[in-house]
Image: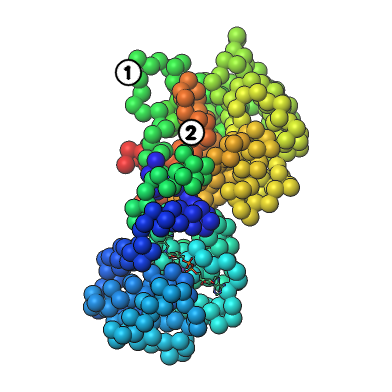
């Protein structure tokens, strides 16, 4: 486990910090160490001699900021301090006194603070516990309007450490230097507009303290490149054959939404799955054959509206012949019987798109509780609401945990920070993505890719949620790479499929 993988709440961070202090590390020494690391990062970004305003709060976040002020002062920057509080914690107060003694000018009134080119935000860290009061709120709004680069220490002041909720107002940072371990709030969608570019400042927290507080392995995890690559089916066994590398059945598409079937198929192709079968309404079979010549296209009888009416498998094939089934993209609501049929099967199943809406109509919890084999649900927020009308999804981490516990399924809630939970509450969060992926068809690609990866993992010990997490990571890395090369406007779903290979080759 790496520290990049760990996610903590404010209470957990306090417990971990408490263990370090109890073991003998002096509080002041740790603050000194952390603030020097922050100063090094700032020095690498801010050109020499610039005017830097340091915003200082009453607690140890303010203490960090004061040590940074002192360091930058001695490293040749023009430094001013804004500190509007009447009461400071003791260590913070000592640093404040020392900063003044070495000639750094400190201002209590906002209007007096000279114009600066850069701001360092040390108003509040994980100790913020209530809404921000009038004076500080208007100062924060004022700094946001300055349009200078802002660097937040630990997290942008004003964000709730766990939920990422804005407690009245918050600093809109360009950079956030998160200290020690990733705070949960920085991975919540409501915080994203405030964080800017986020970096972890590793200050050598012992793994033993992390495990003592969070368990081993911890329950809530960030997906990292290391965790994702460890789950990819690479290298392939030199003696594998096509049936050993998984047989995936996709059930997707309709006359109206033929493209969804193609995109799901192309996502599956990129996974490297050994055998790919795709069940579609008979009228679109020729189209699928022309796009995916390697796949076995199963033509099914169709309804008047052009949806699959029932599954017609060739020869001696049964549903149980497949390693994994992925069902949903482009089906339309008219495909209800086939969705019911696969839910009743004993094959591991991914339920996406139209199949999720059908599941909601059938009754999410009662229907899924009857299933024996593994199920993965991949809703976006709208689908999640239809599936789980009683679950509040403002805290998305808690929402996926609850949904998964209620259904026994692995639940992946799509978004800018996709969250995945298993029924025991083990969570993966995808920490990087791109708004370029907010386009029709991009989810179809994910379903195919995930299906292919799950089919290949079937005979291994890897937990299903780990494979689901890897699929989410791979999909978003392809989007990020495509957006870098083609801008955020250039990542249609078909283009995305062409970047999947490049993303892992990099
Ligand atoms: N966890 C660690 O191991 C380390 C933590 N450090 C720093 O310490 C910070 C946490 O320090 P603290 O616990 O002192 O907390 P903060 O500095 O985040 O702020 C807490 C202070 O603000 C006050 N406060 C809370 N909400 C307020 C509000 N709405 N309006 C006005 N005042 C409010 C509190 O009464 C308290 O005095 C971290 O974010 C980090 O910057 C670092 O110094 C070193 C290492
Ligand atoms: K801060």
Image quarter of residue 153: bottom left
Q: Which numbered disc, 2 or 1, marks the residue that appears first in the sequence?
A: 1
Residue 262 visible in the shown view: no
Up/down of 243 relative to 176, above or below: above
The C terminus, quarter of image: top left
Across and down, in percent, residue 184 comes to: 51, 54
Task: Indicate whether 215 appears above or below 14.
Answer: above
Q: Is residue 286 left or right of residue 474?
A: right
Q: Is residue 295 left or right of residue 80?
A: right
**Number of the label disc, if any, that sits on residue 467:** 2
The residue located at (64%, 27%) in the rendering is: 281
**Viewer-proximal residue, 203 or 147?**
203
Of the pair 236 and 178, the residue shown nearer to us: 178
Q: Which mark is residue 423?
A: none
> Which residue in the protein does label 1 denote?
238
Whether residue 283 sits left or right of residue 237 in the image: it is: right
């Amino acid at each position: 486990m790496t520290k990049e993988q760990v996610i903590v709440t404010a209470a957990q961070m306090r417990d971990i910090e408490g263990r370090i202090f109890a073991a003998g590390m002096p509080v002041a020494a740790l603050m000194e160490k952390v603030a020097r690391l922050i100063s090094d990062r700032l020095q690498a970004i801010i050109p020499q001699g610039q005017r830097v305003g340091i915003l200082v709060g009453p607690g140890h976040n303010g203490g960090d900021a004061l040590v940074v002020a002192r360091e930058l002062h001695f490293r040749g920057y023009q430094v001013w301090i804004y500190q509007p509080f009447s009461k400071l914690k003791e260590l913070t107060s000592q640093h404040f006194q020392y900063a003044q003694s070495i000639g750094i000018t400190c201002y209590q009134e906002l209007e007096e603070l000279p114009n600066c080119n850069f701001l360092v935000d040390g108003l509040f860290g994980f100790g913020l516990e209530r809404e921000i009061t009038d004076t500080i709120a208007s100062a924060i709004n004022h700094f946001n309007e300055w349009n200078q680069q802002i660097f937040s220490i630990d997290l942008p002041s004003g964000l709730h450490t766990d939920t990422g909720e804005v407690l009245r107002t918050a600093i809109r940072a360009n950079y956030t230097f998160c200290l020690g371990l990733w705070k949960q709030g920085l991975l919540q969608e409501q915080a994203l507009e405030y964080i800017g570019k986020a970096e972890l400042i590793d200050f050598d927290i012992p793994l033993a303290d992390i495990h003592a507080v969070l368990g081993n392995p911890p329950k809530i995890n960030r997906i990292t490149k290391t965790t994702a690559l460890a789950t990819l089916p690479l290298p392939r066994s030199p003696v594998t054959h096509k049936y050993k590398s998984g047989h995936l059945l996709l059930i997707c598409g309709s006359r109206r939404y033929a493209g969804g079937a193609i995109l799901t198929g192309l996502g599956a192709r990129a996974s490297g799955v050994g055998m790919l079968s795709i069940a579609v309404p008979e009228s679109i079979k020729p189209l699928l054959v022309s796009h995916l010549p390697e796949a076995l296209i199963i033509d099914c009888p169709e309804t008047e509206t052009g949806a699959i009416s029932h599954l017609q498998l060739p020869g001696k094939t049964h549903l149980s012949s497949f390693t994994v089934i992925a069902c949903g993209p482009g089906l339309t609501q008219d495909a209800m019987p086939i969705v019911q049929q696969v839910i009743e099967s004993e094959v591991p199943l991914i339920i996406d798109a139209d199949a999720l809406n059908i599941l909601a109509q059938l009754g999410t919890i009662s229907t899924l509780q009857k299933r024996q084999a593994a199920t993965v649900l991949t809703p976006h927020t709208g689908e999640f609401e239809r599936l789980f009308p009683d679950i509040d999804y403002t805290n998305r981490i808690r929402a996926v945990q609850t949904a998964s516990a209620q259904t026994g399924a692995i639940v992946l809630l799509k978004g800018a920070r996709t969250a995945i939970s298993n029924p025991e509450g083990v969570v993966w969060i995808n920490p990087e993505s791109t708004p370029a992926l907010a386009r029709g068809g991009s989810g179809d690609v994910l379903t195919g890719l995930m299906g292919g990866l799950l089919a290949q993992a079937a005979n291994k010990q890897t937990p299903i949620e780990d494979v689901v997490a890897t699929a989410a990571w791979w999909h978003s890395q392809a989007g990020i790479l495509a957006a870098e090369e083609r801008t955020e406007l250039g990542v249609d779903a078909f283009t995305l499929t062409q970047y999947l290979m490049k993303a892992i080759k990099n």
